[in-house]
Image (spheres, rainbow, N blue to C red):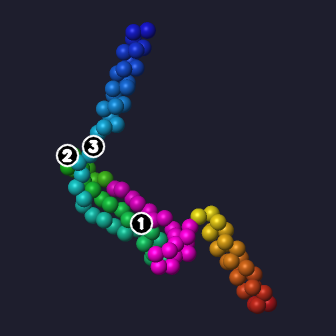
Amino acid sequence: MKALKRTAVIVALGLAAGGCSILDTKPVARESLKNAQGHVVGYKDVMRDAGTGEELAQIALFVPRLGTRGDWSSEGRLVWWWKNAIDRRWMRRLNATRR
């Protein structure tokens, strides 16, 4: 029983110490990420660890926004459904005029 308690305490201390570690990094570069059409969809920060010199990369992608006008924007499942309904209606009308 004592061995089990001792093991549990050692594991808990190890997890606590590992969760509190901090990397000292210096920024190296920032690159824009673009899709096939050339639109910027995010960016990649390249950093260097000050202690080991190892390069680290952090990628941040932008959240697509729909229906932007000035400072106002809308997003979410309902907006995507609404846009899809409008697009389908437009495609049906386009196909009807081509016949």
- Identify the residue under disc 3: 22
Q: Measure the alpha-carbon separation of dots 2 and 3.
A: 11 Å
Q: Measure the alpha-carbon separation of dots 3 and 1.
A: 25 Å
Q: Measure the alpha-carbon separation of dots 2 and 1.
A: 28 Å
- In the picture, the disc for residue 88 is none
Residue 47 picture location, percent across and down: 27, 56
Which residue: 75% across, 90% down? 98
The region drawn magenta spans 57-75
- Identify the residue under disc 1: 42
Which residue: 21% across, 46% down? 52
Mark 2 secondary-structure assignment = loop
Give the quadrant of residue 18.
Answer: top left
- Identify the residue under disc 2: 51
Query: Vertically, is 36 above or below 2?
Result: below
The residue positioned farthest toward the top in the image shown = 1
> Which one is in front, 61 or 86?
86
What's the amino acid at mark 3? Ile
- The N terminus lies in quadrant: top left
